[in-house]
Image (cartoon, rainbow, N blue to C red):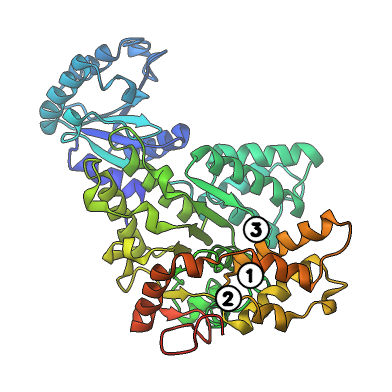
Amino acid sequence: MMNFQDEFGLLLRARYSLLYLVTREEERLETAIAQVAQQQGQRAVYTWDFVDGYQGNPNDAGFGRRNPLQALEFVEKLPTEAAGIFILRDFHRFLEDIAISRKLRNLAKRLKSQPKNLVILAPHISIPEDLSDCMTVLEFPLPNADEIRAEVERLLSSLGSPPTGRLLDELVRSCQGLSIERIRRVLARAIATHQELRPEDIDLVLEEKRQTIRQTQILDFYPAHEAMTDIGGLDNLKDWLLRRGGAFSERARQYGLPHPRGLLLVGIQGTGKSLTAKAIAHHWHLPLLRLDVGRLFGGLVGESESRTRQMIQLAEALAPCVLWIDEIDKAFAGLDGRGDAGTANRVFGTFITWLAEKTSPVFVVATANNVRALPPEMLRKGRFDEIFFVGLPNQEERRAIFGVHLSRLRPHTLKQYDLDRLAYETPDFSGAEIEQVLVEAMHIAFSQNRDFTNEDILEAASQVIPLARTAQEQIQFLQEWAAAGKARPASRYSNFPGSRSLGT
């Protein structure tokens, strides 16, 4: 795969006259551009911004200050055969101006026969429609592990005993997904605190990473404390996950195993799909990123597609990680009927292509309640490693779910509760409904100033109408869909038609 400098250099040689580079790391990008310019016969590099005009060349210092149109006219002043790269910082803010737009289109035609390239630097994509055909967009990636290692070693070279070995490896891994500027800032803070780097400074890096992810307003850095033992039942799914626990290791790469791609969990609400996503991240010791697909859709032209690419770039920079997409069926339901000029289709297309082609260790866990709303492309083989159907828990699983909750709520008096009876008396209840029954039982007992009993739990259960009865048609469809071989059962004994009835 071509890296940024190779791709940028190719576009220069091919005389792509208008380039739009997306980055929040202006200084690092300009360094990369200077390196490419040097490789291509010492091309001159001219840098302009609105406040200071052109910089770097004493003869032209300050030219075009506070005048973006004059900044473009400067390009025409130079000899036709003079090779040059013209970096225009924040120039995306002026593209809506009719004079700027017209001038850029005129320059695009003229520069095709000249070794000159205009490079607009911007933190996000904002290109008017009339310029979309003549402008080429290139994303500048976040620093990779080798770049981070070099920067960390450079920053710490002044220390008497810079970290090596395991601490250095952990620092590099924890810094992935951060810009070079943020890495410098957080490491400087750690050094200023105790004049050296310690293992506990990894927490500072992780907090900086949380801040970065929050600022994108696309992904959430989600704390995952749930263990596999917190999931009652779902034995087939848990066995599948446990077998892949070491699949992200270097030993697995040497063995020839590819990175696991992900899971689609389809099933009824409240059956533990979201809990499973958290437990996977905790069990595999990977960061958990939560994507709210609704946040990908922006109001400006091209903004949704830009946010989707930003989400993918950030997730891959943080890899290995778990990317949790909750209720993906709601995000992409009814694509063809949306009145958004095809934006949802383009976002879906970008996302589904990445799912099929990604080679990075980003394990995607998508959950869906309504399989009928999912586009057929989502269910095609190759998008996920496996599709699991998570149905209503059977009696044995309900017993396990009661056990999980009661061992957390009343670990010292667990034996006082008749788990077999509680499981038998709650047919068709989901895991979430069982949890709510226990909360209601505690309210009953707390109001009477005593501890809650089996009878309180059964009393609370008698007041609940489970979803299995109010949404019986939807649940029956899901069971028949899974029984037809469309999904693998997450439970060892699934409530498929023809097997055991619901709740038995």
Give the mark nearest the N terminus, 1 or 3. 3
The circle on residue 245 is 2
Residue 427 in the image, given as x and y percentages of width and height: 58, 77
Give the residue type at disc 3: Glu
User: Is 299 displayed left or right of 211 in the figure?
Assistant: left
Label 1, on which residue? 283
| Residue 355 lies in quadrant | bottom left
The residue indicated by pointer 3 is 170
Residue 226, visible in the rendered structure:
no
* Other-residue count near label 2 (Cα within 10 Å), few / some / many at <14 / 14–19 / ≥20: some
Q: Which mark is residue 37?
A: none
As measured in the structure, the alpha-carbon distance from the residue carrying label 1 to the one carrying label 3 is: 19 Å
Q: Are marks 1 and 2 in contact (CB under 8 Å)?
A: yes
Q: Residue at x 30, y 43 (%)?
A: 8
The x, y position of residue 344, in whole percent, is 29, 47
Above or below for 316 versus 501: above
Q: Amino acid at mark 1?
A: His
